[in-house]
Image: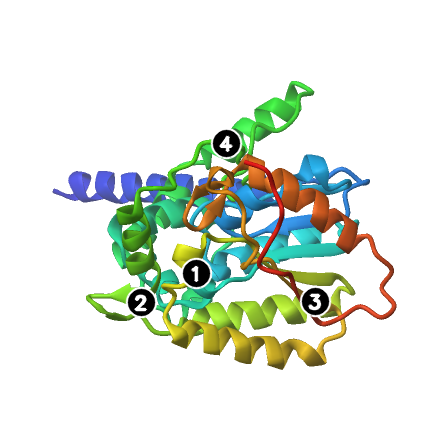
Amino acid sequence: MKKFVLNILLFSGLIALLSLGSYELNKRLISNDPYLIPSNVHTLILGDSRMQTALNPELLPNSVNISMSGEPYIATYLKLKKVIEDNPNIQQIVLGFSQHNISGYSDSKFKDDKISRKLFNRYNLLMKRSDLEGLEYHHTAWYMLYLNQVILPNPAFVRNWIEKVKGKEPHGYPYIGKFYSSDYSLIGRRAKNDSTISRHFYKNGQIAGISQISRSSLDSMVALTQRQNIDLYLFKSPVHPYYENMIPELYNEVLGEIINQLAEYEHVRIFDYSKWRFPDSHYGDYDHINSKGAEILSVEFNKIINSPKEGRLHYITYPPTLQVHP
């Protein structure tokens, strides 16, 4: 019996030792493997899939688009902190800023079994439990992924380390996205728009409310960029009028309040392209433009952000009509 207990203790000690070693390895892998942006890049494009499809960095000189589909503001903030820390050449941040970004819909992602696992898998090396304070989240998904990172080395960063040893570029980072280019259009399937509106702004048939952690994360990004002397451009990308007209008024009102509150910050500008009207062929679906729309929008936006700072307006909205041939 004593031998059995001793074996159990030795085995447990070995597991604990290996886990501690793996945990320290993961910390070293992420700290020694930062996402480095070329020194000539000074504009960072951030947000969810709406920004991922809106601005093409190939048409915005010295920029990179690292937006990711389904990314809530809390994750964007944690990512922004890390990227700014590792890349002092960043001078401008272009951040997606629309009604769905402040909806309670963002909070629901952390409670959904499938979506929460996906989010934690992307960001858990940047995210601590304290970052989720006040947010209901899927505890099993969090602890399973956290345990996995303790027991096993993170495969993404291990691959990057191997590539660096070989003298090659890193394979990729779980929290870094890129511009998505497609000229496909789903316009005409209005049932899809209705389900998107329902998902973004309703819960069980009722208004989903406002995400306080998203508002707090936005405030944190405003403060972070102010401390780092970085211009913050909040960007409302174009959506189809059918989608725009179905957004509950609560979200328009709260977004308007936020815009007014941000007027005191000299480094913040808001660009509202949400009412730009493209031909249906330039929308990917009702709340995203496709590569045709992105080409036009990127060229136009590039003219604006390269204008002199003197006399810049805090809030700039663009006319709802745009002459574009299908």
Mark 4 or mark 2: which comes first in sequence?
A: 2
- Give 295 or 75, whichever is nearer the viewer: 295
Asked if the residue at tag 3 contacts the one at tag 1, i.e. Cβ–Cβ closer than 8 Å, the answer is no
Name, please, the residue furthest toward the top: 166
Q: At which x and y percent is residue 280? A: 46, 42
In the rendering, which numbered label is found on residue 28? none
Q: Looking at numbered disc 1 in the image, what kind of residue is underneath it?
A: Glu
Q: Marks 4 and 3, Cα distance to the nearest angstrom?
A: 29 Å
Residue positioned 51% across, 40% down in the render: 282
- Give 196 or 7, whichever is nearer the viewer: 196
Residue positioned 75% across, 70% down in the render: 313
Relative to 192, 1 lies left or right: left
**Disc number lying in front (1 or 4):** 1
Relative to 203, 34 lies left or right: right
Residue that carries the numbered disc 4 in the rendered image: 182
- Asked if residue 162 is positioned above or below residue 18 in the image, the reply reads above
Residue positioned 69% across, 54% down in the render: 84
Residue that carries the numbered disc 1 in the rendered image: 244
Q: Callout 3 environment at 10 Å: few (<14), some (14 to 19), or many (20+)?
A: many
Figure quadrant of the C terminus: top right
Residue that carries the numbered disc 3 in the rendered image: 269
Mark 4 or mark 3: which comes first in sequence?
A: 4
**Disc number lying in front (3 or 2):** 3
Q: Marks 1 and 3, Cα distance to the nearest angstrom?
A: 22 Å
Mark 1 or mark 3: which comes first in sequence?
A: 1
Residue 124 appears in the figure: no
Residue that carries the numbered disc 2 in the rendered image: 136
Q: Callout 2 environment at 10 Å: few (<14), some (14 to 19), or many (20+)?
A: few
Asked if the residue at tag 1 contacts the one at tag 2, i.e. Cβ–Cβ closer than 8 Å, the answer is no
